[in-house]
Amino acid sequence: MGKDTRLAIVIPCYNEEGLIPSTTDRLIELMNDLIQREKISSESYIYLINDGSKDNTWEEIKEACEKHQGRIKATKFSRNFGNQKALLAGMTGAHNIGCDALVTIDADLQQDETKIEEFVAKYDEGCKVVFGVRNDRKTDDFIKKSTALAFYKFMNILGVNIIKNHSDYRLVSKEALDVLEKFNETDLFLRGFFHEIGFKTGIVNFDVKPRMVGKSKFNLLSLTALAINGITSYSIVPLKMICVVGFICMLFAFITGLIVLYAKLVYNDSPNGWATAIILTSFFGGMQLFCLGIVGEYLGQIFREVKHRPRYLIEEEIL
Ligand code: UDP
Ligand code: MG
């Protein structure tokens, strides 16, 4: 509690050149203030994960480590592994270095960093995981906004309970990190995971600011990949749905067959029905391909998991 809480601020960084000095200075200032007011311990630190940046990010990180001796720690991936892997590495790394709780936040500080104090207050109240929930999506374009909404709706329909508009801005306590260590899925879907573990959770609402430097590292493709991973790693409802759809199609085909047979036997007008035949073949062809695709997604998920490859590779560390 309070001045005994060793807090780690975990930041994934990919091509964030130009942002590292201002972000680290700002967070050190914020941490100093919290330390002074005895909200967190003076042992608290910032932990940066360089996710295979191709620009000067790592040099800027090293400079920041020099400037704020011992208060900034960093890890460098050997290549880009994606934001979720960087977050995982950050959480595992901070857990190994030692912390009572950590807060993950983006390098562009789009999420209101002053709310870290509220996250810590919730932790002091006994919450083991605190979710940051965005107040609105003003800074997102129409496509990002509507696909995100559709995703959360779909996940809820599938029976996966994730809070709408919650982001990777969250506090995770040491206890939750202990549990995280036991889950060694390669493609762990963090937004689903922290709901599954069942610890006492809390919510902090925050506003999203526009990005100051650079541009968003996500596009529709990477967001779709994240969404599909979320679905296939937390729900097998699509697999079950295939059976139901397949059964209905079979029934439909059976009835159509009976009608066609009846027409043939009673009226003997067989050349008709070209259209029907083509529509039906293409309908079922399409349906089968669609179902195969869903099975394929799961197969891919299993494929990635059975290989049990390391989630990420670390090239360099500053601890
Ligand atoms: N990020 C990362 N690896 C990637 C893509 C992004 O570590 O492959 C980091 C990025 O540096 C930032 C955070 O993930 O700290 C969120 O990225 P961004 O701000 O581009 O996402 P958005 O705000 O558009 O959701
Ligand atoms: Mg951002």
Image: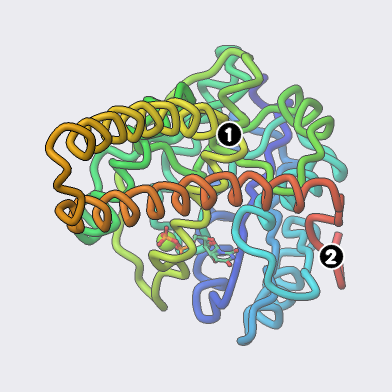
Q: Earlier in the sequence, mark 1 or mark 2?
A: 1
Disc 1 element? strand
How far across and down, in percent of the image, does residue 227 sit?
Answer: 47, 48
Q: Residue at x 63, y 79 (%)?
A: 57
Which residue position holds label 1?
A: 171
**Residue 203 versus residue 181: which sits nearer the camera?**
181
Q: Residues within 10 Å of mark 2 (few under 14, many from 20)?
A: some
Q: CA distance from mark 1 to mark 2?
A: 25 Å
Q: Which amino acid type corresponds to the residue marked 2 in the rendered image?
A: Leu
Marking on residue 313:
2
Decide: is 64 above or below 187: below
In the image: residue 307, left or right of residue 113: right
- Please identify the quadrant where the C terminus is shown: bottom right
> Disc 1 or disc 2, which is closer to the eye?
2
Marking on residue 195:
none
How far across and down, in percent of the image, does residue 114 sit?
Answer: 42, 43
**Residue 14 versus residue 237: which sits nearer the camera?**
237
**Residue 178 versus residue 247: which sits nearer the camera?**
247
Q: Residue furthest bottom?
A: 55
Q: Residue at x 86, y 53 (%)?
A: 307
**Residue 157 versus residue 102: which sits nearer the camera?**
157
Disc 2 element? loop
Residue 189, quarter of picture: top right
Q: Residue at x 62, y 31 (%)?
A: 193
How far across and down, in percent of the image, does residue 25 sit?
Answer: 55, 64
